[in-house]
Image: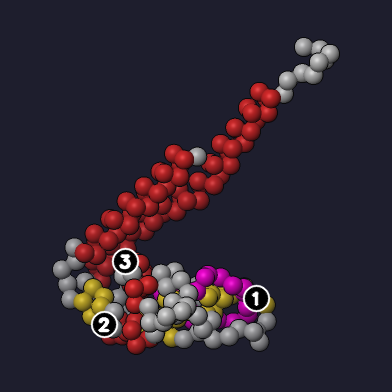
């Protein structure tokens, strides 16, 4: 089990190092986020009916409703709570007021490129509150984003998609592998401890 968990940790660190290196090596202008994206607030969903549209907060999916706030590729950025907990979405969704969504000019920036870059930006360091970690639109709008050509953006996205898939397959397969190892251990443990009682046939 320890070897499997160490393997996952090593692959994750390898992926993060390579991802960060790709962005650090970019020799291109950096522009404020608000030059190509609009940050939008979330709203309550309490009056909606049940449906199949996921409702996102800063912790992830909260419930499902019957309407969406946006249906184009976007990056969700937490406003409160876990500030590094970003989401990339291409399907319709609703978002509450603890998380922003972004309307991105795709003629300038590929949404998934922005998502991957923001994963390296340590948004938690931009916290503006003393209690619950918080971000404001004003602060986010000034975050500088590298903007190479669309072709270069797509190349980076393709590379990171492949790395992400490898890491995800390990993350998803690990619990099953651990469960199999535990079952195997328990089987042999029980076999070893299944001694016949005194007077029973050997």
Secondary structure at badge 1 equals: strand
Say the numbered circle drawn on residue 32.
2
Task: Report, in whole angstroms, how far the alpha carbon at label 3 lies from the one at label 2.
Answer: 16 Å
Report which residue position mark 3 lands on.
120
Of callouts 2 and 1, which one flags the residue occurring earlier in the amino acid sequence? 2
- Residue 54: x percent and y percent? 57, 73
> Can you say whether 96 is above or below 149 in the image?
below
Q: Is residue 37 magenta?
A: no
Which residue is at the far front? 130
Report which residue position mark 1 lands on.
51
Nearer to me, 1 or 113: 1
Q: Quadrant of residue 164?
A: bottom left
Task: Report, in whole angstroms, how far the alpha carbon at label 2 lies from the one at label 1.
Answer: 37 Å
Comparing labels 2 and 1, the label whose residue is closer to the camera:
2
Which residue is at the far left? 27
Nearer to me, 77 or 69: 77
From where the camera sits, is residue 84 visible?
A: yes
Identity of the residue drawn at 79% across and 19% down: 197
Identity of the residue drawn at 29% across and 65% down: 154
Nearer to me, 104 or 42: 42
Q: Residues within 10 Å of mark 1 (few under 14, many from 20)?
A: few
Q: Residues within 10 Å of mark 2 (few under 14, many from 20)?
A: some
- Residue 80: x percent and y percent? 47, 78
- Residue 173: x percent and y percent? 51, 46
């Amino acid at each position: 089990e320890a070897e499997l968990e160490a393997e996952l940790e090593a692959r994750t660190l390898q992926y993060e190092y390579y991802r960060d290196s790709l962005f650090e090596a970019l020799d291109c202008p950096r522009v404020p986020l608000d030059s190509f994206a609009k940050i939008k607030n979330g709203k309550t969903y309490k009056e909606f009916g049940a449906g199949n549209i996921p409702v996102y907060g800063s912790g992830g999916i909260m419930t499902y409703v019957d309407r969406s706030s946006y249906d184009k590729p976007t990056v969700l950025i937490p406003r409160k709570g876990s500030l590094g907990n970003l989401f990339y979405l291409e399907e319709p969704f609703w978002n509450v007021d603890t998380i922003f969504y972004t309307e991105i000019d795709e003629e300038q920036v590929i949404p998934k490129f922005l998502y991957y870059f923001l994963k390296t930006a340590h948004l938690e360091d931009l916290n503006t509150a003393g209690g619950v970690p918080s971000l404001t639109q004003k602060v986010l709008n000034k975050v500088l984003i590298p903007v190479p050509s669309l072709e270069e953006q797509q190349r980076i996205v393709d590379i990171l998609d492949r790395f992400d898939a490898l890491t995800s397959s390990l993350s998803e397969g690990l619990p099953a592998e651990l469960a199999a190892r535990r079952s195997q251990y328990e089987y042999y443990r029980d076999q070893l401890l299944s001694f016949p009682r005194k007077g029973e046939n050997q």
